Image (cartoon, helix red, strand yellow):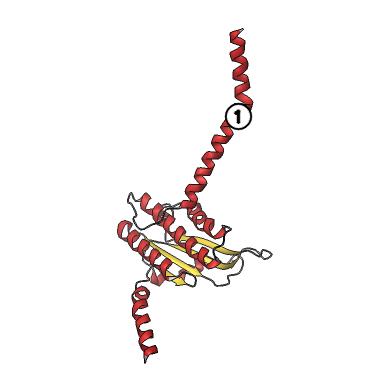
Amino acid sequence: MIKAKVRFSLLALLLPLLLNASHILKNDLLNPQASKLIEDMGNELAEKTDIHGYVIATNENFPVKFNLVTYSKKYEDNMSKPYVVLIFAANARLTEKSTHRGRIALIPSSTEVGKLYDKGDVIDATIDVVASKDKNTKEDKFNVGIVQGFSELADQIASAKNVKMTTTIPNDTRYVIRALQVVVIIGAILVFWMFLFRPIYMRIRHGKRK
């Protein structure tokens, strides 16, 4: 009797999440917290831009060069146009000889939708987290990476539509990389100044004094 009550309580808690999981078409990887973040972002994106964002998080063992566009079509009945789908295939093979696995794809419903975001930036936002070397588990990295990638996608579409998202997550990795790039540029300028331009400047200066 007690077990039955516990099961009923768990079902009652999970049922609203399952019923509202309209932006996650397949979920082999996401935990409830990550799922909720994606649903919140997807709802806001659709409300403000009329663009529908979807996620397919799968651990299926796709072969090399597996056609993810064709694969996405099997979910089309559950999608509303215009849309863009972020596919995160954790176990997809890259090459016949490679031991590394994992592919990310962005599939828009039209070329017009595809112009609303930078595919490279969205993929980078996802990969940066997954590829990082730290003590986090692979599962945790998948969750953070997918959420970060979908957040970047939603932000870019919203920006193209001149609206502001409130449920997305700042891409800290991107900002850190840009900050490091600025530091490198400043360092290069200082090196050029010290070893190239400063000696020339000092010669000219001393030459004028003479």
Q: Which residue is at the front of the view, 160 or 164?
A: 164
- Where does residue 145 sit, x and y in percent of width and height? 49, 61
**Residue at 57% across / 31% down in the picture?**
190
Q: Residue at x 53, y 57 (%)?
A: 127
Left or right of 150 on screen, residue 183: right
Point out the image quarter for the C terminus. top right
What amino acid is labelled 1 in the image?
A: Phe
Q: Is residue 153 left or right of residue 103?
A: left
Residue at horizontal 49 percent and vertical 50 percent from the top = 174
- Identify which residue is drawn at 51% across, 65% down: 140
Residue, far bottom: 1
- Find residue 53 and report its horizontal and vertical position in percent: 40, 62
Element at label 1: helix
At label 1, counting other C-alpha atoms closer than 10 Å, the crowd grade (few under 14, some 14-19, many 20 or more) is few
The count of marks equals 1
Q: Nearer the viewer, residue 119 or 102?
A: 102
Residue 132 falls in which quadrant of the image?
Answer: bottom right
Is 112 above or below relative to 90? above
Q: Tell me, yes or no, if residue 75 can be seen here.
A: no
- Is 180 placed left or right of 153 in the picture? right
Residue bearing the label numbered 1: 192
Q: Residue furthest front?
A: 2
